[in-house]
Image (cartoon, rainbow, N blue to C red):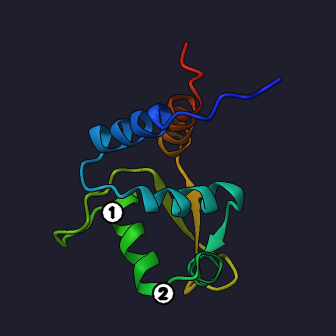
Amino acid sequence: MQIAPRSNTNERLAAEYVTAQYPQFRLSQISFLLAIEARPGINHSELAAELGTTLSAVARNVDVFGSQKGTQARQHNHGLVETKKESTDDRIKSLYLTDKGHKFLRTFRQVLYGNLD
C-alpha cells in the first residue's frame, strides 16, 4: 500500500487561520506558545533556553501575546499568555496559556490536521 504525499493545503490553511486572527503573528511564534503549553509555569529564562533564543525575544512575545495592559506600540495584548509572579521570588515570572491561548492552539491543530467539525 502506498501512502499519498501529504499536501501543503492544511499548512496553508493553518497559516491563513493564524494571520486572520493575528495579522502580525509569525508562524515561528507557534513554538513559543507550544513550549508554554508543554510546560505550564515555565519562566522566561527556561523558555529562552528551550527555544534557543534571547530573553528579549521571549519578552517581546509575552508583550504581544500576553494579557497585561501595555503602553508600548508592540504590546497588542492578545490574551493568549498570562504571567504570574513566583511566590518564592517575585522577580521570576512564570508563563501560562490562558483559556484563549488553549483554544487558539486547539483550533490551529484542527485546521492543520484537517479535523474541523
Residue at horizontal 53%, vertical 40%? 99
- The residue most toward the top is 117
The circle drawn on residue 64 is 1
Callout 1 secondary element? helix
Query: Where is residue 37, by image quadrant?
Result: bottom right
Query: Where is residue 88, by image quadrant?
Result: bottom right
Disc 1 or disc 2, which is closer to the eye? Answer: 2
Residue 115 against residue 7 in the figure, above or below? above
Locate the C terminus by quadrant: top right
Residue closest to the eye, 12 or 43: 12
Callout 2 secondary element? loop
Residue at horizontal 31%, vertical 39%? 21
Q: Is residue 71 left or right of residue 5?
A: left
Residue at horizontal 56%, vertical 52%? 97
For badge 2, the amino acid type reads Thr
> Which badge, 1 or 2, is on the more N-terminal residue?
2
Looking at the image, do the residues carrying marks 1 and 2 touch, with CB atoms under 8 Å apart? no
Residue 107 against residue 53 in the figure, above or below? above
- State the image coordinates of residue 32 (x, y, percent, origin top left): 52, 64
- State the image coordinates of residue 74 (x, y, percent, origin top left): 22, 68
Residue closest to the eye, 58 or 90: 58
Q: Is residue 83 left or right of residue 13?
A: right
Q: Residues within 10 Å of mark 2 (few under 14, many from 20)?
A: few
- State the image coordinates of residue 40 (x, y, percent, origin top left): 68, 60
Query: Where is residue 106, by image quadrant?
Result: top right
Residue 55 against residue 77 in the figure, above or below? below
For badge 1, the amino acid type reads Val
Question: Residue tagged by mark 2?
Answer: 54
The circle drawn on residue 113 is none
Q: Residues within 10 Å of mark 1 (few under 14, many from 20)?
A: many
Give me the C-alpha separation between circle 1 and circle 2: 16 Å
- State the image coordinates of residue 108 (x, y, percent, origin top left): 50, 37
